[in-house]
Amino acid sequence: MTSAPLPTLLLVDDEPHSLAAMRMALEDEFDCLEAADAEQAMACMQDNYVQAIFCDQRMPGRTGAEFLAECRERWPETVRIIITGYTETSDMISAINEAGIYQFIPKPWHPDQLLMAARNAVHLFRLSRDHERMSLEMRYLSSAADSKLEKRRKALREGLGFDHILRAPNSPLNAVIGAARRHASFDIPVLLTGEPGVGKAEIARAMHYASLRSDRPFFALNCAGMTDEMLEAELFGIRRGAAAGVQSTRIGLFQKADRGTLFLNGVDSLSPRMQIALLRVAAEGAFAQVGAMETQTTRLRLICGAHRDLKTMVAEGAFRSDLYFALAVAEIAVPPLRARPGDVSVLAQSLLADLSARHGKPVRGISDAALEFLEGYDWPGNLRELENEITRMLVAAQGPVLGPELISRPILQAEPGQDPDDRRASEVMVAEGALKDRIELMEMRILRETLTRLRWNKSRAAAELGLSRVGLRAKLDRYGLAPPAPVGAEEED
C-alpha cells in the first residue's frame, strides 16, 4: 500500500544557510523545494504543484512581495508567507495589498513556529481547493439536477433577472425595462430616478444579473437618512481603533463590491462632503478606510438612484455638477405606481400569494370589486404602501377571497376611474368651486366608503350615517351609486 505524497512547499531565500535551516525544520512532514531568487522560484512553480510558499522579503532583483504578487495572479490558491527581518510598515502594507500575504514570520524564527505555519498553510490550501471544487460542481450542474439555487443563478447569469419585475403586458414600465436591459451589458454608471418605493433597487439588481458581472456580488444601500459617519463606515469601511468601540477592522461596500455592482439609492440626500468622496470613487475608483492613510482602489460598477431631479438640484447648487455627470452616463426614469394603473392588479395578486405563504393564511385571491378600488388609488407610497395594504387586508380577512370591505378608508374614498387630481375626499377640502358642489362631492365619497366597508348592507349604513332607509336610497339614486357586483345575502333591500 503506497502512502499519500507529502505536501509540497517552496522555500525562497538568497542565503544558503537560511534555506538549509528551513528545510531541516520542515522536511519531515513536507516535500521542500528550494530557490535562491525569484527567477528560480518561478521555474519551480511552473514545474511543480506547490501548496505554500515561504519567501524572504529582501532578495537580489525582485523582492519577496513582488514575486508573491505575480504568484497571486498566476496561482491564486497557493498560500503565500513572507519571512523577513525587517518590519517597515510600508513594506508590510504593500505586501498585504499587492501579494495577498497570508502570514508574516519575523526573523529569527523558531522551528516549531515555522512548522505550525506550514501546517496551517497546507490546511488552508486544502480547504480552498475543496471550496473551489464544490463551487465548480454547483456551477456546472445540469438543468436536471435538484439544485434550485444553481438553476436560479444560471437563469440570472443569462439575463433573466428582468422577468422577476412584475408588470402588466402594456405597462409603461416596459419601456423602462427595455432601456435598462440595453444598458445592462455596458459597463457604465447608470442613474435611476423616481419616487421612493417605485422599484429602483429591483431594476438595478436585474441590470447586474444581465451584465458581464453577474457572477460577482451585488450590494445595495439606501443613503437617505444616514449621517456622514454612518455612510463612511458602510461605504469605506473603518480601521480597528479608528473610533470608540471599533474592536476590529470593518470592510466597506466599496471593497466588498470590487468587480461587482453597488446600487446606491438616495444619492440626492448626500452632503457636500460625501458628494466629494463619491466623486473620487466614481471618477478614479479610489477611496480610503476611515482611520487609514493609504488609498485603496475598487473596480465596482456604480448604479445610483435618486428620489429628486438631480438636474434641478445642480441648477440650485445643491448637487455637484461633476458628480452628476459622473453618475448619469445613462439616466432612466422609473414611473410611479399611479402612472401604471394596470400593474396594480398584477402586483397585488403576487404580493398576496407571497404574504399568504409567509403568514400561513391560505386565500384564493382578490375580488374584482376590490381590485377596482386598488386600481383607482394613486398610491403615494408606491410599492411599499401597496404591500402594507395587502397585508392589512390579509390579516382582517375572514374568507378565502379579499373583498372591498377590507380596504382602508382613504382608498375606498378614491372612486375608480377618476383623474389623479381628485381621488381622495381630503382633497375636496382644499379644492376650488361652489360650496354646494364640494359638499355633495364629500357626501358621495362618504356614502360610497361606508357602503363598501359594510358590504352594501343598507340598514347598517343608514344606521351608522343617521339616515332613514328611504333617505339613503334617495341619496344613492341622486349620486348614481350602486354596488360594483352582486353582494349576496348581506344586502338588505
Image (cartoon, grey):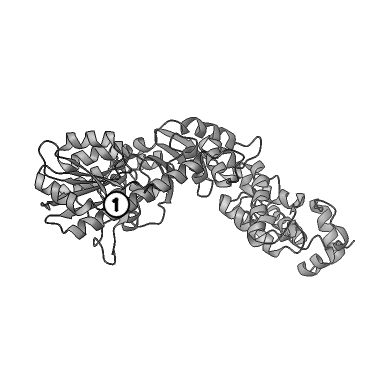
Say left or right for 227 vs 419.
Answer: left
Taking the spot 12% from the left edge, 53% from the top edge, the residue there is 87
Q: Residue at x 26, y 63 (%)?
A: 243
Q: Is residue 435 above or below residue 156?
A: below
* Percent x, y of residue 231: 34, 54
User: Which residue is depicted at the point 61% across and 51% down?
Assistant: 431
Which residue is the extreme one toward the front?
1
Q: Position of residue 12 (x, y in %)?
A: 17, 43
- In this orientation, does residue 415 appear? no
Q: Where residue 205 sits in the image (x, y, percent)? A: 49, 43
Quarter-of-image position of residue 48: top left
Drawn side of residue 308 relative to residue 469, left or right: left
Residue ID at (77%, 69%): 464
Image x and y of residue 264, in percent: 41, 46
Label 1 sits on residue: 121
Residue 332 lies left or right of residue 373; in this view the side is left
- Amino acid type of disc 1? Ala
User: Relative to the observer, which residue lies in front, 97 or 414?
Assistant: 97
**Which is nearer the eye, 125 or 2?**
2
Label 1: few (<14), some or many (≥20) within 10 Å? many
Looking at the figure, which quarter contains the C terminus? bottom right
Depth check: give the residue in front, 267 or 131: 131
The furthest residue to the right: 493
- Indicate left or right for 467 with 427 as reference: right
Count of numbered circles in the view: 1
Residue 428 placement: quadrant = bottom right
Label 1 sits on a secondary structure element that is helix
